[in-house]
């Protein structure tokens, strides 16, 4: 953070256990840290989490989210989630949906369970039928799609510092960049802006990106 010339720091985590009180304090004290964190949760069910040996619960995961947003109210999150883990019942799946509604992730990487040789889970009975896994994944992804759009719509009319990454892949007269929340913003601008941080006002909310205008 103290290195001159570095404007932003963004990183990923592999497990909620890596989010310590000292790390949370960094988000309070270090403005170069982006207001975004990838924090996998895998399932909202305490029973499934225990079977996965994840060593956290629905409540303790939400507490991490609350603590992070306590020091950065605008904090955005993405995560990994799985459906159809051995033993996952309908109640377990509903708890996953409840967690998604509570956190309101910007992005979810979602998968249906399949046995992986050499893992402890591979010794468990793969007892959730494939059609049910597919149905749960489809329902979850539809829910997340709605939340992502609503999150983007909440950014309409707001202005953000956007680090310009490159030319827009769709429009030759546009460039794109990311906000501190990792939201992609496309706007009309010259290629000379690439590498710069500029102020952009959001004028349209799309499903997976934002459109804006240079201020």
Image (cartoon, rainbow, N blue to C red):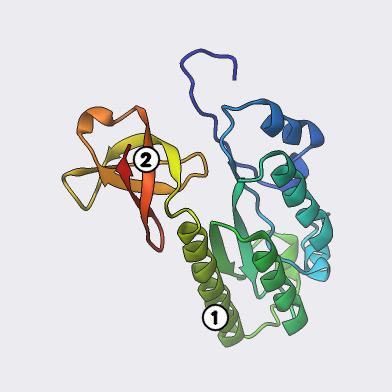
Q: Give coordinates of residue 122: x percent, y percent.
A: 70, 67
Q: Give coordinates of residue 185: x percent, y percent.
A: 37, 47
Q: Is residue 57 visible?
A: no
Callout 2 secondary element: strand
Residue at the location (70% across, 59% down)?
119
Q: Quadrant of residue 209?
A: bottom left
Instruction: Give the position of the C terminus as an image quadrant.
Output: top left
Q: Quadrant of residue 29?
A: top right
Instruction: Sort mark 2 into few (<14), some (14-19) or many (20+) by Cα contacts within 10 Å.
Output: many
Residue at the location (56% across, 65% down)?
110
Is residue 11 depicted above or below 208 in this figure?
Answer: above
| Labelled disc at residue 95 | none
Taking depth in this image into account, of 60 and 50 the one nearest to the observer is 60
Q: Which residue position holds label 1?
A: 134
Residue at the location (59% across, 31% down)?
33
Taking depth in this image into account, of 73 and 88 the one nearest to the observer is 73
Q: Give coordinates of residue 17: x percent, y percent.
A: 77, 44
Task: Count numbered badges in the picture.
Answer: 2
Callout 1 secondary element: helix
Q: Is residue 88 visible?
A: yes
| Labelled disc at residue 200 | 2
Spatial CA span between label 1 and label 2: 39 Å
């Amino acid at each position: 953070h103290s290195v001159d010339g570095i404007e932003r720091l963004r990183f990923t985590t592999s497990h909620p256990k890596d989010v310590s009180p000292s790390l949370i304090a960094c988000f309070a004290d270090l403005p170069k840290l982006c207001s975004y964190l990838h924090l996998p949760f895998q399932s909202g069910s305490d029973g499934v989490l225990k079977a996965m040996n994840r060593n956290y619960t629905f409540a303790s995961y939400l507490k991490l989210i609350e603590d992070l947003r306590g020091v950065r109210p605008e904090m955005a999150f993405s995560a990994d989630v799985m459906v159809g883990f051995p033993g996952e019942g309908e109640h377990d799946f509903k708890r996953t949906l409840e967690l998604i509604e509570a956190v309101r992730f910007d992005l979810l990487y979602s998968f249906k369970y399949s046995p992986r040789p050499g893992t402890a889970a591979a010794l468990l009975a793969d007892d959730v039928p494939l059609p049910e896994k597919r149905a749960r994944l489809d329902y979850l992804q539809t829910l997340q799609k709605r939340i992502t759009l609503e999150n983007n719509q909440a950014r309409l009319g707001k202005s953000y510092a956007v680090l310009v990454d490159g030319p827009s892949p769709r429009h030759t007269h546009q460039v794109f960049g990311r906000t501190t929340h990792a939201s992609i913003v496309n706007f009309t601008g010259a290629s000379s802006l690439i590498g710069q941080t500029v102020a952009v006002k959001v004028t349209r909310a799309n499903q997976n990106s934002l459109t804006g205008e240079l201020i």
